[in-house]
Image: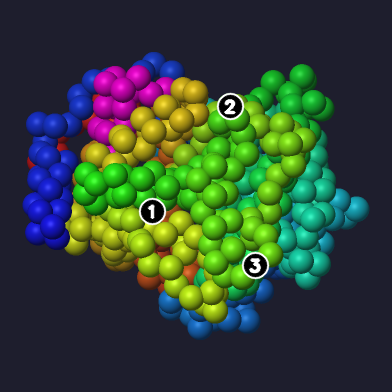
Amino acid sequence: MKRLLGLFAVAAVIFGLDSTSINLEKFPDDFIFGTASSAYQTEGAWNADGKGENIWDHFVHKFPEKIADGRNGDITCDSYHKYKKDVVLLKKLGVNFYRFSLSWTRILPTGFPHRINQAGIDYYNNLINELLANGIEPIVTIYHWDLPLELQKLGGITNSLFADWFEDFSRVVFENFGDRVKFWLTINEPRLICVFGHSTGVFAPGIQSGGIGEYLCNYNVIKAHARSYHLYHKSFRPTQKGRIGLVIDCQWYEPATNSTEDIEAAERKLQFDCGFYGHPVFSKKGDYPQVVKDFVAERSEIEGFPSTRLVLFTQQEIEYIRGTSDFVALNHYTTYYAANDKTITPFTEHPSSAKDSRVHIWQDEDWPSGIFPEFRTVPWGFRKLLKWLKDNYDDPDIYVTENGFSDDNKNLHDRGRVNYTTLYLSALLDAIYKDGVKVKGYAAWSFLDYFEWASGYTIGFGLHQVNFTDPNRPRLPKDSVKTYTSIIKNRKLTPID
């Protein structure tokens, strides 16, 4: 069976890299192109001009051993001081939009709205105005993982008041920036916040509470998103006329065989990872997927818990959360094989959503990869995922808010990224023209090489290389800049050499 899967994998790779398979249709007239960043990864100036400390500031300073190269985001690209130079590069790139996030503690140093830091407001006003002056639409993520440390001391996202705190922060940013920002993203990748931050603990705040704190995080972060959406819809949309949505990360899971067990396992993994956050917001029924509720309840009972570890929504909460997004904002990178895992480990082991799902996943080593091996190039999985979102969430508008390829930050000749971008955009065009998926935009991750969380500076996803040993942090365009600029200008792809 393993050999057979390998042959299928090789066939898929050959098909994916065949230049004749590139979709040469033009992108629709209303399709928009952009690139993306996040505040902690790019701004630097970690304690400048009244900014408060956030959980990533604290995490990298207290636990440098948890970062691959022991480094931090204190300066990173220094975009706080170099935003005008960045906008010049964005203008040269030709993008329609730039997605960036707001540093909560740059605006509210303690996390609470009683003290607003005017320097932080000024910085984001200047950035927004500079983008608009150059014909680039700002797409703003309200929260991208950098929770104020003062709120974390109170329990952070696992505190039942988190939704109140997030609504208060949302109100401040809508009041200050909503006259010009017309495209809002509430929370970036809640799954990774809860799994990496509250289960495995490899990301800030470093909590290891799989299947318990992890699920409390899920519950609170989804409610917080809904609170921000309703606030905007009721109090700001009538005058500001913008749109707002949630960012979910979804990879594709391909059944390892055509057996019923593996087909169900692949779908189950999709529901645990993508549906866990998508279903409550985007589906007609709302609530967590039924298979998620069933499997968590079953394993909780086996482990000796008196009831399910999943924090369930009330009917009132289901109705309040359902429909709280004007579009699907999708972050996608790669594909895995999935097989049913019949093993039920003893109840004495620590619980987690991975164990609850009972799915074994892996990737074929023949699939091309960059320096980060988990993000292999599998464009056919991207097309399948887009069709899955269309079928499961009532044919929504979809904006791809992250998609990218990793390298080692050392080579401007990034052929792997050129191929990856071309192949994934070709799969996206296939989804539009052959499957009828309403994909409306695409953001290449990332604009620059950044501090990449637990990987530090050992990998980079940037279209531009940054010299992190030079105090001036010079930016140099990689070959992929020329490719992406050409795609945007011509609104079509060219075959791969």
Whether residues under marks 1 and 2 lie with C-beta atoms below 8 angstroms apart, the answer is: no
Of callouts 1 and 3, which one flags the residue occurring earlier in the amino acid sequence? 3
For the residue pair 448 and 22, the one nearer the viewer reads as 22
The answer to whether residue 343 of the structure is visible from this angle is yes
The label on residue 305 is: 3
Mark 2 to mark 3 CA distance (whole Å)? 31 Å
Q: Secondary structure at mark 3?
A: loop
Whether residues under marks 2 and 3 lie with C-beta atoms below 8 angstroms apart, the answer is: no
Whether residues under marks 1 and 3 lie with C-beta atoms below 8 angstroms apart, the answer is: no
Q: Amino acid at mark 3?
A: Phe
Q: Which residues are the magenta region?
A: 424-438
Q: Amino acid at mark 2?
A: Lys
Residue ID for mark 2? 284
Give the residue displayed 46% in from the left and 30% down from the top: 392
Mark 1 to mark 3 CA distance (whole Å)? 45 Å
Residue ID for mark 1? 462
